[in-house]
Amino acid sequence: MNGEFEPLWTVADVSAFLEVPVHTLYGWRTKGYGPPARRVGKHLRYLPGEVRAWFVSLDSEAA
């Protein structure tokens, strides 16, 4: 790791990337599905690399 991080994504950022409604992300989270998120204070934040990795992993689950 080189110490440089991409800016964290908000729920709206992930929603736009995955092209799903924000309420879908919240629903997935309550069911233990979806990309991993972290709480920063009262806000949910996502590491872009983890969101991308989760999305790519869907291909292997479907196969």
Image (tube, rainbow, N blue to C red):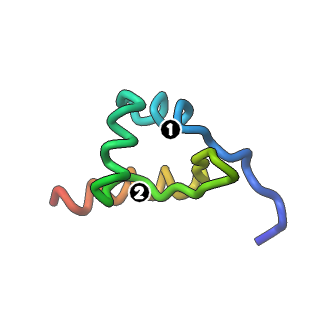
Query: Quadrant of the rendered structure where residue 23 is?
Result: top left
Residue nearer the viewer, 60 or 24: 24
Q: Residues within 10 Å of mark 2 (few under 14, many from 20)?
A: some
Compared with 9, 63 (above or below) is below
Give residue 27's quadrant in the image: top left
Asked if the residues shown at circle 2 and circle 1 are in contact, with their CB atoms under 8 angstroms apart, the answer is no
Q: Say which quarter of the image contains residue 26.
A: top left
The residue that label 1 is drawn on is 14
- Image-based side of 50 in relation to 6, left or right: left
Q: Secondary structure at mark 1?
A: helix
22 up-or-down from 3: above or below:
above
Answer few, some or many: residues within 10 Å of disc 1's Cα (few below 14, many 20 plus, some between 14 and 19).
many
Q: Give the numbered dot on residue 6.
A: none
The residue at the point 33 percent across, 53 percent down is: 30
Observer-nearest of 13 and 28: 28
The kind of residue tagged 1 is Val
Q: Give coordinates of residue 31: x percent, y percent.
A: 28, 55
Tell me where residue 62 appears, x and y as whole percent.
Answer: 17, 56
The residue at the far bottom in this view is 1
Provide the residue designation for mark 2: 54
Judge whether 6 appears above or below 14 on screen: below
